[in-house]
Image: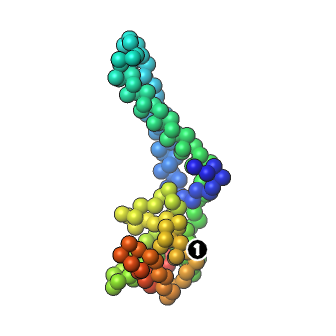
Amino acid sequence: MDKNKKIYLTKEGLAELKREYEELVNSKRPEILARVTQARNMGDLSENAEYVSAREELAFIDGRIDELEVLLKQAVVIRDSKASSHHIKLGSTVTLHVNGKKEVFTLVGEWEADPMNKKISHESPLGQALIGKRVGEEVEVEAPAGKLTYHIVDIK
């Protein structure tokens, strides 16, 4: 992970990462440390599956804690886009028409992207095509099924 790259998050996304960090540091990590200690006290560590398992889980949690610390230091909160919805930017909710269907997407940072819930990254092909566009404009995006043309209907 590039330690100088800005990580764009909504207020909700930042709060979720902080919650996860607090839970890992204050709850899960101490639980796993207790398991490691308990397993270590069982004797021969070379054949102690519980010790090996607990150490692996601790390593995973420590890695995630380190990752979250970097993310939280680099986090930039996306401003509320409702103040100015003349053009699409991070945090915008966009209504599009594509192939006769209406689709609504919210543009978020890469760490919050969740296509199943219509949250797309500003770094995705569609996200990149939409940034800076206005209502009435069209964008073309290359998709596995071919080029798709999106007509911008509304920006919030």
**Residue denoted by label 1:** 83
Of residues 116 and 43, the one nearer the viewer is 43
Quadrant of the rendered structure where residue 90 is? bottom right
What number of labels is visible?
1
Horizontal and vertical percent position of residue 123: 53, 66
Front-lying residue, 82 or 99: 99
Q: Residues within 10 Å of mark 1 (few under 14, many from 20)?
A: few
Identify residue type, mark 1: Ala
Give coordinates of residue 62: x percent, y percent.
Answer: 50, 35
Q: Is residue 41 above or below residue 89?
A: above
Residue furthest right in the image: 4
Q: Would residue 64 be visible to someone looking at this image?
A: yes
Residue at left offset 58%, top offset 77%: 132
> In what element is the residue under mark 1?
helix
Residue depicted at x 51% and y 38%: 63
Q: Position of residue 27 (x, y in %)?
A: 45, 33
Question: From the viewer's perspective, is residue 111 above or below residue 31?
Answer: below
Query: Hey, which quadrant is residue 33 in on the image?
Result: top left
Residue 32, how many percent across, how many down? 42, 28
State whether residue 64 is above or below residue 123: above
Residue shown at 51%/86% (left/top)?
137
Q: Residue at x 49, y 67 (%)?
A: 124
Q: Is residue 27 visible?
A: no
